[in-house]
Image (cartoon, rainbow, N blue to C red):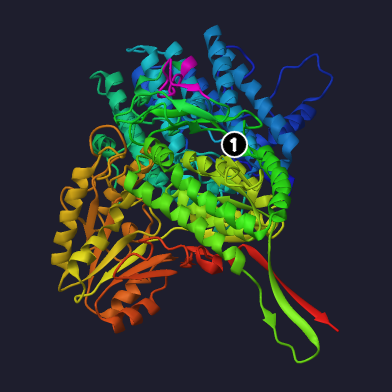
């Protein structure tokens, strides 16, 4: 469509005040309206043509009415404020002008394709002309407002336009720099940007009208409505198909916008850069966008946003009644809120005014509290009803938790002593926290002096407030070190390398108590689990040390007079990215074969649980491994992306989530096509046949209790033969009762086997799954509840009789949740067990060896345990890997050693 067509196809043009003081013109910005310029030499027709050019982009947008929510709100508030008709017309007109002018700028900044179902103005008129048109209307709006002859109006206009551009500027800064704000900072931005125009109208009306209550009450109500409107818009952008026709499919993702659900997802999963990386791409790919929305669903961020919307809507209605104070004039505003919720809030049942308070009170998260898990006090809930007036809209919503005068003192260059009291009996001064990077055999600060705080899952206290955070520059430093370390490592003899790996395993055992302490204080992991992991890690290094002497290629027989053989040679510099839930075992599963194969390794410890890993890495030099052969980093997606895309790193091994794995694969392919090994999530089935040992089987069905369900291999889908289901369920319940009695026990006691969820955000995610699961299955009594007191403890939830499409049956919840189904036929249960995109592990309980062989061969999983867990006791020589979307490549065993090498074929002819 041509530019001329856009400029002339507009409908009713903008209402403005005429040129005479005190006179209201309810017509339009017409290019033919007479303007008094008696001293100008330009003719009226020229001026009219100029006006048409100047206002073309604006009138192109204004021709297509939007939601008109601002005009409706002005009318609703006027039920209270009783503004004179002429003044009300001016205020409405000014707000409409400012809103549409701001949209012109927004669409340029967002590079939007559509606005109100038509091409955005800058695509029709060009960017420069559209910017000028918006600026022109900003000043015309000021001129319009000044006709009310009240200097306070101009002050309000200036203050709120500054707020609007403040909010817009921060929004742009976050997008351009990839900086994810906290929820409180996001709400502050929305209060300035979206709430600013709502607030400008109400402030002007308070000046011109007759408010019965304090102006601050009306202004606070307007701000709340603005924020409700924006969060609803954020939600609809990602979930409402009708947006596709008017603005584009999930346009916020293309714009790289940190909307409310996206902020929640990123802040709730600080170790996962999946969404962050998608925002950086500014993608138009529908498949990528759909995956992002699925990720938001799995994170619980869409459910969280729905809860916040309900709660905020309830607060709006409550404050509206307070403002009304019995006048009976709040209904118009309530009707607007009802229409907003009906149109914008995707729910299975209708949202009603009467259900608002109940919905808000049932929502299991703090009231709009900031979501930064390591910087905020979750009990310091923020309510918008308590927000300060216009100039300090949402100030003071965030504060650090655990700030005291004596949180910690440095005891050496790379570690930090913890001095907060904990409810456990051990020597606090005995161990130090490794809170720095470990590069070339020495502790090192972050190159940009970036630090974070980490908080205990047991006590909610800050454990260390000075954890150094790696950047891309630190990755470069680690690679430079690894180049030197690689040469030194490969220069050692096989015997020296074998002895070093054996010694490394011994040192891990010698430092077991420190590892217990670091894991327990930060994560609450019980000593029994930590002991298992230390022993498994030590055995893994011992196993791969022995393989150094036996690791060889193959001589191939030739009929002609030549020699042909293969060699398995190291990649060189490799990288490993570790998870939070079993960092020491995962470190050993990657580092031991990598080193045995002759590689150097850069390890990114989990940013949620780095301390035990960093301690283990620091022992490498003492074991006889040259400095630089193993380097350790602490960091988030920035460091992970730098590792995955670095041109000198030839292989990367990752344990974690599927979305992050996809990003790592993409970065690896787009850089140097590095080799990638992935160990991802699971939703392991447990099948119990009627001939099984029911006591042992019931014990096996309680895997979901281990580490409070935070293990990718754990069986969380249980299929019981119908004839024995009641017997097994009763045994499971008895075990759960013993587990509950053990909750919140001292993790340093040998008889403690319970652990908390990792942090408050994970706890809330699990609770949302449980709450949603109640509509999909039957929750057995007493389960799925938060346990009072400090720490992130939940009573285990046992669901029975789920629907086939239940989210609790399909999603990896990573919490103490198990779903039990019954079956009668073998082929039916195999089909049900395989009805998942995840294929990490599976478990079969039967005494029939024929059935065991038959069923295990048909299960689509990389590791199957019959009548037991294949990883208990630990055996490093057993290879395993994920099927389907649970991973690629293998870990453990001789095959994993091959996975850390490149094969070379050599033929020597005579």
Q: Residue at x 24, y 45 (%)?
A: 751
Residues 547 and 516: in front is 547
Give the main secondary structure, helix, strand or loop, of the magenta stretch: loop
Q: Position of residue 3 (x, y in %)?
A: 73, 45
For the residue carrying disc 1, how many other residues have a C-alpha within 10 Å: few (<14), some (14-19), or many (20+)? many
Which element carries disc 1, helix, strand or loop? strand
- Please tell me whether residue 651 is drawn above or below residue 17 in the rendered image: below
**In the rendered image, the vertical position of residue 893 relative to residue 532, given as above or below:** below
Residue 635 shown left or right of residue 517 in the figure: right
Q: Which corner quadrant of the image does residue 823 belong to?
A: bottom left
Q: Quadrant of the C terminus?
A: bottom right
Residue shown at the point (63%, 58%) measured from the top left = 495
User: What residue is rendered at 54% in x and 65% in y?
Assistant: 888
Residue 762 magenta:
no
**Residue at the (80%, 13%) spot, across then down:** 39
Residue 781 visible here: yes
Which residue corresponds to mark 1? 437
Along the line of sight, the residue nearer the viewer: 821 or 305: 821
Image x and y of residue 169, in percent: 61, 28
Position above or below: 866 against 641: below
Taking the image as shown, residue 815 lies to the left or right of residue 388, namely: left
Q: Give the range drawn in magenta.
A: 391-411
Position of residue 301 measured from the top left corner of the image (x, y, whole percent): 42, 44
Picture coordinates of residue 327 (x, y %)? 25, 19
Q: Is residue 401 magenta?
A: yes
Q: Confirm whether residue 290 shows in the render.
A: no
Left or right: where 62 falls relative to 459: right
Between 572 and 800, the residue placed more toward the observer is 572
């Amino acid at each position: 469509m041509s530019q001329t067509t856009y400029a002339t196809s507009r409908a009713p043009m903008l209402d403005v005040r005429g040129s005479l003081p005190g006179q209201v013109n309810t017509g339009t910005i017409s290019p033919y309206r007479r303007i008094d310029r008696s001293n100008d030499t330009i003719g009226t027709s020229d001026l009219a043509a100029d006006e048409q050019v100047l206002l073309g982009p604006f009138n192109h947008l204004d021709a297509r009415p939007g939601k008109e929510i601002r005009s409706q709100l002005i009318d609703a508030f006027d039920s209270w404020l009783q503004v004179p008709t002429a003044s009300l017309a001016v205020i409405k007109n000014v707000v409409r002008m400012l809103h549409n002018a701001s949209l012109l700028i927004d669409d340029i900044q967002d590079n939007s394709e559509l606005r109100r179902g038509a091409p955005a103005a800058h695509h029709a008129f060009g960017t420069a002309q559209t910017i000028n048109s918006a600026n022109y209307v900003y000043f015309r709006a000021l001129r319009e407002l000044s006709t009310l002859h009240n200097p306070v109006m101009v002050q309000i206009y200036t203050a709120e336009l500054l707020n609007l551009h403040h909010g817009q500027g921060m929004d742009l800064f976050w997008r351009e720099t990839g900086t994810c704000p906290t929820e409180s900072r996001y709400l502050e931005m929305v209060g300035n940007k979206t709430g600013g125009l709502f607030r400008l109208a109400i402030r002007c009306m308070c000046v011109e009208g007759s408010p019965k209550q304090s102006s601050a009450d009306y202004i606070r109500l307007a701000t709340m409505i603005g924020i409700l409107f924006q969060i609803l818009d954020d939600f609809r952008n990602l979930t409402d198909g009708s947006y596709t026709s008017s603005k584009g499919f999930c346009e916020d993702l293309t714009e790289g916008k940190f909307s409310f659900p996206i902020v929640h997802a990123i802040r709730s999963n600080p170790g996962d850069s999946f969404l962050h990386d998608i925002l950086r791409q500014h993608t138009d790919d529908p498949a990528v966008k759909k995956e992002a929305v699925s990720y938001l669903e799995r994170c619980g961020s869409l459910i969280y946003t729905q809860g916040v919307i309900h709660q905020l809507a309830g607060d709006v209605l409550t404050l509206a009644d307070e403002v009304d104070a019995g006048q009976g004039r709040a209904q118009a505003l309530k009707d607007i809120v009802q229409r907003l919720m009906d149109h914008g809030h995707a729910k299975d049942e209708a949202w009603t005014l009467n259900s608002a308070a109940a919905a808000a009170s049932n929502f299991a998260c703090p009231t709009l509290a900031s979501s930064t898990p390591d910087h905020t006090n979750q009990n310091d809930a923020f309510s918008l009803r308590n927000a300060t007036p216009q100039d300090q809209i949402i100030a003071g919503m965030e504060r650090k938790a655990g700030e005291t005068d004596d949180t910690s003192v440095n005891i050496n260059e790379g570690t930090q002593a913890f001095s907060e009291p904990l409810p456990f009996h051990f020597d606090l001064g005995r161990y130090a926290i490794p809170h720095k990077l470990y590069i070339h055999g020495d502790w090192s600060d972050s190159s940009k002096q970036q630090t974070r705080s980490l908080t205990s899952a047991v006590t909610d206290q800050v454990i260390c407030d000075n954890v150094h955070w790696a950047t891309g520059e630190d990755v470069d430093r680690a690679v430079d070190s690894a180049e030197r370390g690689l040469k030194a490592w490969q220069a050692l003899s096989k015997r020296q390398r074998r002895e070093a790996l054996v010694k490394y395993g011994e040192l891990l055992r010698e430092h077991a108590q420190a590892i217990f302490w670091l894991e327990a204080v930060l994560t609450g992991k019980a000593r029994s689990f930590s002991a298992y992991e230390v022993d498994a890690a030590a055995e893994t290094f011992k196993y791969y040390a022995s393989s150094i002497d036996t690791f060889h290629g193959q001589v191939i027989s030739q009929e002609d007079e030549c020699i042909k053989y293969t060699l398995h040679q190291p990649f060189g510099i490799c990288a490993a990215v570790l998870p939070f839930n079993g960092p020491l075992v995962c470190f050993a599963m990657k580092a031991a074969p990598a080193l045995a194969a002759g590689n150097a390794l850069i390890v990114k410890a989990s940013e949620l649980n780095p301390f035990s890993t960093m301690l283990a890495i620091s022992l490498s030099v003492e074991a006889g491994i040259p400095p630089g052969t193993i380097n350790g980093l602490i960091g988030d997606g920035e460091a992970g992306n730098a590792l995955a895309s670095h041109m000198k790193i030839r292989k990367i091994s990752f344990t974690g989530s599927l979305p992050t794995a996809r990003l790592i694969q993409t970065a690896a392919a787009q850089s140097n096509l590095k080799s990638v090994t992935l160990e991802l999530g699971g939703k392991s089935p447990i099948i119990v046949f009627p001939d099984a040992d029911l006591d042992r089987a019931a014990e096996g069905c309680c895997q979901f209790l281990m580490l409070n369900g935070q293990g990718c291999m754990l069986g969380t889908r249980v299929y019981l033969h119908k004839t024995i289901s009641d017997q097994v369920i009763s045994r499971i319940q008895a075990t759960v009762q013993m587990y509950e009695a053990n909750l919140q026990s001292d993790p340093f006691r040998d008889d403690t086997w319970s652990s908390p969820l990792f942090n408050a955000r994970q706890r809330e995610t699990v609770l949302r799954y449980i709450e949603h699961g109640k509509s999909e299955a039957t929750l057995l009594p007493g389960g799925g509840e938060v346990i009072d007191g400090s720490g992130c403890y939940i009573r285990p939830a046992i669901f029975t009789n789920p629907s086939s499409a239940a989210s609790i049956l399909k999603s990896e919840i990573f919490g103490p949740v198990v779903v039990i189904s019954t079956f009668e036929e073998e082929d039916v249960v195999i089909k049900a067990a395989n009805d998942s995109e995840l294929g990490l592990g599976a478990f079969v309980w039967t005494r029939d060896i024929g059935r065991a062989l038959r069923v295990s061969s048909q299960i689509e999983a990389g590791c199957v345990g019959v009548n037991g867990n294949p990883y208990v006791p630990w055996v490093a020589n057993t290879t395993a890997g994920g099927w389907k979307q649970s991973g690629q490549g293998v870990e453990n065993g001789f095959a994993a050693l091959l996975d850390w090498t490149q094969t070379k074929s050599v033929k020597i002819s005579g």
